[in-house]
Amino acid sequence: MTASPDNERPSDNERPSGGARPPDGGGAPAPAVRAADLRKTYPASGPRPEVPAVRGIDLDVPRGEFFGLLGPNGAGKSTTIGMLTTLVVPTGGGASVCGLDVVKDAVEIKRRIGVVSQNNTLDSDLTAAENLEFRGRFFGLSAKDARRRADELIELFGLGEHRKGNPFEMSGGQAKRVMICRALMHGPEVLFLDEPTAGLDPQTRTNLWDVLRGLQEGGQTIVLTTHYMEEAEALCDRVAVVDHGRVLASGTVDELKASAGADTVITVSYDDAAPRDIEALADRGGITKVEVNGGQVRVFAAEPDGVLGELVALGAKAGVGVTDASQLRPSLETVFLTLTGREYRE
Ligand SMILES: Nc1ncnc2c1ncn2[C@@H]1O[C@H](COP(=O)(O)OP(=O)(O)OP(=O)(O)O)[C@@H](O)[C@H]1O
C-alpha cells in the first residue's frame, strides 16, 4: 500500500513539537534531511484499527548524499517519504528538510524539493515537454526559461523522440524519466524518489540507475525508497534498513555487511525434523550461529566452505532428506536475515 496525502491534521497536542530544525545562517548548510523519533499512526477507519506505520525513525542525510530507505512492502518507507515531502502529517517526533520543519515550513520545503512518486502522475492532457514547462511555470520560471530548462532535461534524459508524446502512451521507464525531469525543473536541493524502478524490467531498471548515478555525480542530493536490495547496493552511499516502521540498521552497505551480515547464510530444509546433532555445528570454528526451526536449518558462517555438504551428510545419517538448499553470500539480504531472523520478502 502506498501512503497517500492525508488531510487529517493532528490536533495541537499531538502535533510534532518542532522537529529537528538546525540553526539557520552561518556555518555549514543544514543537512538535506534530519528526522528524530519521527512517527505516523494512521487513525482507525471503520472496522480497520489504527495503523502505526512509522514508529520512531531517526535519519541524518548530508547534502550530496545518495541515501536509501530499504525495506519490504509495508515497512513504512512511503509514509516516511510522505512526511519528509510534507504530504503526510507526522503524529509524533519531527523532521527537517534543508533545515526547514516539515510541518511549520511545508510550503517553503515544497519549493526546495523534487518528488517522484510511485505512480504515473503526469498530466495526460499535456505532452511530455508541456508537462515539464507547466511545472517550470508553476515554480515561477518565465515561458522562455521553462522551455529552455525542459529542452535541457529532455536532452539529458534521452527523451528527444518523446517530447511531444503522451505520457500515458510511453513505456513505464520513459514515463518515469519524464517524471524525474519534471521533478528537476526548478532545480530542487533534494530529490525524493519513491520506488523509482518498481515494476520496470531489469534492463530499464539499470538504465534508470545510470540516470540517477549521473544526477548524483552532478551534485544532486537524492533520497529514495526501494524494496530491491540490489538497487540499494548499486546506488546508495548509505542505507537505512526499515521494517515494521523502524530503522533496524543504517550505514554504508559495507558497514552494514560488516556489522550485521558478514556471514554467508546457508539454509537447508529437510523433509522431516532436522537432525539433532546439527546444533553442535555452532561450536565449530568459522560458524557464528546455527538456527533450527522444525525441518529448517540456517547456518551463519564466516567460513562456509563444506558446510552445505555437511548438512546434507548429517541429514543422510539421520535418515532425513534435503528438499531445498540455498547459500547467500554476504549482502544486504544477509544483513536483513541477521537482523530480523526472517528472509527478505519483496
Ligand atoms: N493512507 C493510509 N491509511 C492507512 N494505512 C496506511 C496508509 N498508507 C499506508 N498505510 C499502511 O501503513 C503501513 C506502511 O505502509 P507504507 O506504504 O508506508 O509502506 P512501504 O514500506 O512504502 O510499502 P510499499 O513498498 O508497499 O509502498 C502499511 O501497513 C500500510 O498498509
Image (spheres, rainbow, N blue to C red):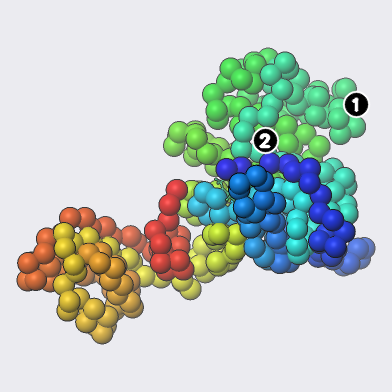
Q: Is residue 128 left or right of residue 242?
A: right
In this rendering, which labeled residue sits more in front, label 1 or label 2?
Answer: 2
Q: Type of residue at label 2?
A: Ile
190, above or below 207, in the image: below
Disc marking residue 332: none
Give the image location of residue 204, x and y in percent. Answer: 49, 33
Q: Which residue is mark 1?
A: 142
How many discs appear?
Answer: 2
Kindly indicate the quadrant of the structure image that contains residue 304.
bottom left
Looking at this view, name the residue that lies furthest to the right.
25
256, above or below 168, in the image: below
Disc marking residue 180: 2
Q: Secondary structure at mark 1?
A: loop
327, above or below 277, in the image: above
Residue shown at 27% from the left, 80% from the top: 282
Kindly indicate the quadrant of the structure image that contains residue 327.
bottom left
Looking at this view, name the residue that lies furthest to the front.
47
Q: Is residue 95 left or right of residue 278?
A: right
Task: Find out whether the residues at labels 1 and 2 contact each other: C-beta distance under 8 Å.
Answer: no
Q: Is residue 222 visible?
A: no
Name which of mark 1 and mark 2 comes first in the sequence: 1
Residue shown at 50% from the left, 67% from the top: 256
Q: Residues within 10 Å of mark 2 (few under 14, many from 20)?
A: many
Q: Secondary structure at mark 2?
A: helix
Taking depth in this image into account, of 47 and 319 the one nearest to the observer is 47
Residue shown at 25% from the left, 67% from the top: 294
Q: Type of residue at label 1?
A: Ser
Give the image location of residue 332, x and y in percent. Answer: 45, 60
CA gap, disc 1 and disc 2: 21 Å
Q: Is residue 115 visible?
A: yes
Quadrant where the N terminus sits is top right
100, above or below 3, in the image: below
